[in-house]
Image (cartoon, helix red, strand yellow):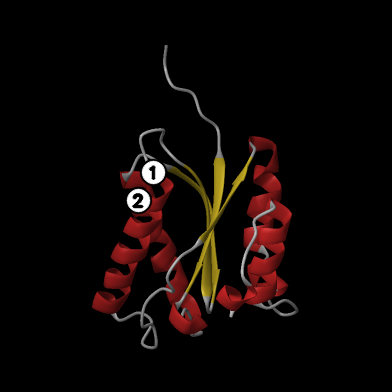
Amino acid sequence: MSTFTQILYHIVFSTKNRTPSLCGSNREPLYRYIWGLIKNRDCHLHRIGAVEDHVHILTTLHPCQRLADLVRDVKTKASRWIKDERIFPDFIGWQDGYGAFTHSRRDKDALVDYINAEKAHHRRVSFADELRQLLIEAGIEFDERFLL
């Protein structure tokens, strides 16, 4: 028998100290770079989006991949690439940790729309409030000190 999985992961991580450094048109090259990292791990990227201080990734993982390894790889290699290419001059790195939320296939379109609407969404909601809501909806206990 083969291994069959269909788990969508909504991954969220922020820039170090939530510095608004992911500015301008250079996000598209960043998206392509991260897409390549995910593809090279035999995972499937459904959507990626970012605003100045954080990134959202919607992906499925190959059954042999571990979520923590994928996120570590993406953050480490993307950080090095950003610094080498100097595409975001104020970028100093990624915040420690990340949020990851599982979803079913039927949630995919709504999640893609959510990530596509990030820019408009953050005109009225802060990243801390957004992350707090994602954690509450997922039933994850958290310490408010780590949302700052």
Nearer to us in this view, 39 or 9: 9
Instruction: Point out residue 19 in the picture as x, y percentages from the top left corner.
Output: 48, 85
Q: Residue at coordinates 64% horizontally, 36% vertically from top-left?
A: 105
Judged from this view, the residue extending furthest toward the right is: 124
Query: Identity of the amino acid at label 2?
Result: Asp
How many residues crowd mark 1 within 10 Å: few (<14), some (14–19), many (20+)?
A: few
Distance from label 1 to label 2 (Cα)? 5 Å
How many residues crowd mark 2 within 10 Å: few (<14), some (14–19), many (20+)?
A: few
Figure check: 40 above or below 29: above
Q: Left or right: 124 with respect to 87?
A: right
Instruction: Point out residue 7 in the picture as x, y percentages from the top left corner.
Output: 55, 37
Instruction: Give the label on residue 69, or none.
Output: 2
The image quadrant that residue 28 belongs to is bottom left
Figure check: 7 above or below 132: above
Nearer to us in this view, 31 or 66: 66
Q: Residue at coordinates 72% horizontally, 76% vertically from top-left?
A: 125
Which residue corresponds to mark 1?
66
Instruction: Give the label on residue 20, or none.
Output: none
Instruction: Point out residue 119 in the picture as x, y percentages from the top left corner.
Output: 65, 73
Q: Left or right: 26 with respect to 118?
A: left
